[in-house]
Amino acid sequence: MRDFPPDALEALHEEARSLAQRAHGTHASDILREAHAQLNQYERLISVAGWRARKQLHRTAGLTALVGAYAAWWSSGAETDLLLKVADTHAVAGSDPVVRAQVYVLKSQHISQEAHAIEAGSTEAVRLLTAALQITDATSPPILRSIVRYNLAWEYAAFGDTRAAHMELDAAEWEYEQATPALDVVSVADGAWKIRKWSHSARGGVLARLNLHREAIDTSSKVLIGNPLWQTSSMVDIARSYTLLGEIDEASSLLEEAYLLNVKAGLVQRQERIYTTRLLLPDCPSVRHLDSVLR
């Protein structure tokens, strides 16, 4: 068995973090391919590593598999379940609650994709998110707990539990205010989450599901900058709110823009909400133009 110096182990972990950062501006299929290559490398090292190095290598492999799972989910979903299982196995072996909690968060989104496409809640998602919250501890990044609570707030809003939704929303925003950059948290790994007002996207989605549409539009509009990974979900939230307010041309325009941005970035998974939101729109010239793009 081989041992590895601490600086070599840290360099490998920085390589995994770099992949997580680049996932915010690189085509999802490219990130998935790189994740597989890096994961194979780390697993070969784990097979020959001494016990001192093995734990850190498991953490590095877990983070890499998680990045791959996100990329798979964004692009087609085909390998998401497998990579989530690999990420969880490595996180357990590496005693890594941060990656384990994120596995539960992504799993909650993945299994609820059809329900979320029609703005419905999921009891299984609530179970997984509650488990993710329990996995985190005082040493876990506040931004991670914030992500979990924003997702819980959305689920409660979808179920019509307004009180629970507002409680989780308040808790999420308190955690967000305590947050500092966390490079092992994949969905905010690029480090620019504070500048880009990432929380406005999450809050806007919850407000829209609570049918507070004007407030939701104002909040979500603050994140319509940067790469598609950050903004297209908010664009669909805003489009849905415009639709329910009867502002059809505005909704059609945003859905078209979101669709084209997702195509460019390889975010296939995000298109389903666009198609289901389109079904809410009446027949009119702007909607017929949208249909010509969606085909």
Image (cartoon, rainbow, N blue to C red):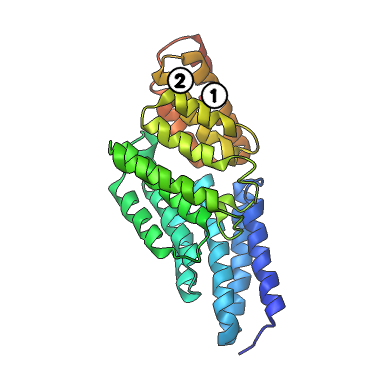
Q: Nearer the viewer, residue 232 or 6?
A: 6
Relative image position of residue 226 (x, y in whole percent): 65, 37
Q: Nearer the viewer, residue 273 or 9?
A: 9
In-front residue for pair 162/158: 162
In the image, residue 58 lies at what x, y percent? Answer: 54, 74
160 or 20: nearer the viewer: 160
- Would residue 295 be seen by someone viewing this image from the given angle? no
Q: Residue at x 37, y 62 (%)?
A: 134
Amino acid type, residue under disc 1 in the picture: Leu
Image quadrant in which the N terminus is located: bottom right
User: Which residue is depicted at the point 62% across and 78% down?
Assistant: 45
Q: Residues within 10 Å of mark 1 (few under 14, many from 20)?
A: many
Which numbered tag is attached to residue 242?
Answer: 2
Local SS, label 2: helix
Instruction: Provide residue 36's location: percent of width, then percent of height.
Output: 59, 62
Q: Amino acid at mark 2?
A: Tyr
Quick check: 85 above or below 124?
A: below
User: Residue at the top extreme?
Assistant: 285
Residue depicted at x 53% and y 42% = 199
Q: Is residue 97 visible?
A: yes
Q: In this rendering, is residue 214 above or below 137? A: above
Q: Which residue is mark 1?
A: 254
Answer few, some or many: residues within 10 Å of disc 2's Cα (few below 14, many 20 plus, some between 14 and 19).
many
Which secondary structure, mark 1?
Answer: helix
Could you tell me if the residues under marks 2 and 1 are in contact, i.e. CB atoms within 8 Å? yes
Image x and y of residue 161, in percent: 28, 39
Outermost bottom residue:
1
Quote the CA–CA distance across marks 2 and 1.
10 Å
Camera-near label (2 vs 1) is 2
State which tag comes first along the sequence, 2 or 1.
2
Q: Quadrant of residue 183?
A: bottom right
Q: How many labels were placed on the picture?
A: 2
